[in-house]
Image (cartoon, grey):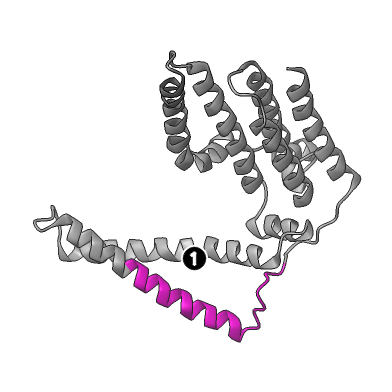
Amino acid sequence: MKSFNRSLNGEAGAHLRNIDPRAKIVAFAGAAVIVVTEPPGGTQAYLYYYLILAALFLFGRMAPAGVLRRSLPAIPFILTAAVLLPFSRMAESGGAADWGLSLSLFLKAAAALILVSLLVASDSLDRVLGGMRRLGLPAVFGSLSSLMFRFAFIVNDERLRTERARLSRTPGRLRVNRFQVYGRQAAMIFLRSWERAQTLHQAMLSRGFTGTYPSTREMTFSLRDAAFAGLCLGLFGAVRILA
């Protein structure tokens, strides 16, 4: 019974979070390249691609809603590009709009976006960046990405503080120029965030920060990790060749 409960909770058996981040980076990045290089216009192969993605969700015991929520901000841009592409091709060739091309572009971009979101959701940012450094990514890029990720929380915190301050001073509907008020609020958010980030950076330097973040878990690349990367790339590659 205890083993069954651990399996339900994702603590036993194959679990995507227990895979070495280097294996996931290679597998998901390679799979995204395979999907992106799919010839435009065809849509049959994407059925198999999305079946593989569903299998990855089941294997990793990942909640699809949480992963898809990370992809939502980029969906409008993908949808806009997919809708406008047939019209641009129609203007060049003078023929009818090819909506199959539009659908294939949307499915291609959405699959690649889900793969990236699945990578980020299946592990901590520090371990993903650490895996990228182990694979040869320059340390400065990893440090900048990590600092930008943390800076986003500072900006959001200052946004909430300035929003509360504005509402306490001007309750109800704004009776003055909204663009002026929101512009000043945005400038205040930027200045406060910049000052707070400088203070935090000085505190980090005083505590011995050298530009890289220590990893909380040691990375060990095992045969299981290699098998996962090989199987993932093999499935996507088989669809790319056969479908």
Q: Quadrant of residue 189?
A: bottom left
- Magenta segment includes 198: yes
Task: Name the residue tied to disc 1.
Answer: 151
| Image position of 5 (left or right of 116) | right
Q: Could you say where residue 118 lies in the image, as x and y percent from the top left? A: 63, 41
Q: Quadrant of residue 179?
A: bottom left
In the displayed image of the protein, which residue is found farthest to the bottom? 206
Q: Is residue 10 visible?
A: no
Q: Could you say where residue 104 lies in the image, as x and y percent from the top left? A: 56, 23
| Residue that appears at 50% across and 23% down | 102
Tag 1's secondary structure? helix
With respect to residue 145, does 229 lie above or below?
above
In the displayed image of the protein, which residue is found farthest to the front? 93
| Residue that appears at 60% across and 23% down | 40
| Image position of 134 (left or right of 90) | right
| Residue that appears at 76% across and 45% down | 26
Image quadrant for the N terminus? Answer: top right
| Image position of 231 (left or right of 240) | right
With respect to residue 144, does 128 lie above or below?
above
In this picture, which residue range is highlighted in magenta?
189-214
Nearer to us in this view, 50 or 97:
97
Q: Could you say where residue 50 lies in the image, as x and y percent from the top left? A: 64, 25
Q: Amino acid at mark 1?
A: Phe
Query: Which SS type dominates the magenta stretch?
Result: helix
Q: Could you say where residue 222 lies in the image, as x and y percent from the top left? A: 89, 49
In the displayed image of the protein, which residue is found farthest to the left? 175
- Magenta segment includes 153: no
Nearer to us in this view, 114 or 122:
114
With respect to residue 53, does 243 lie above or below?
above
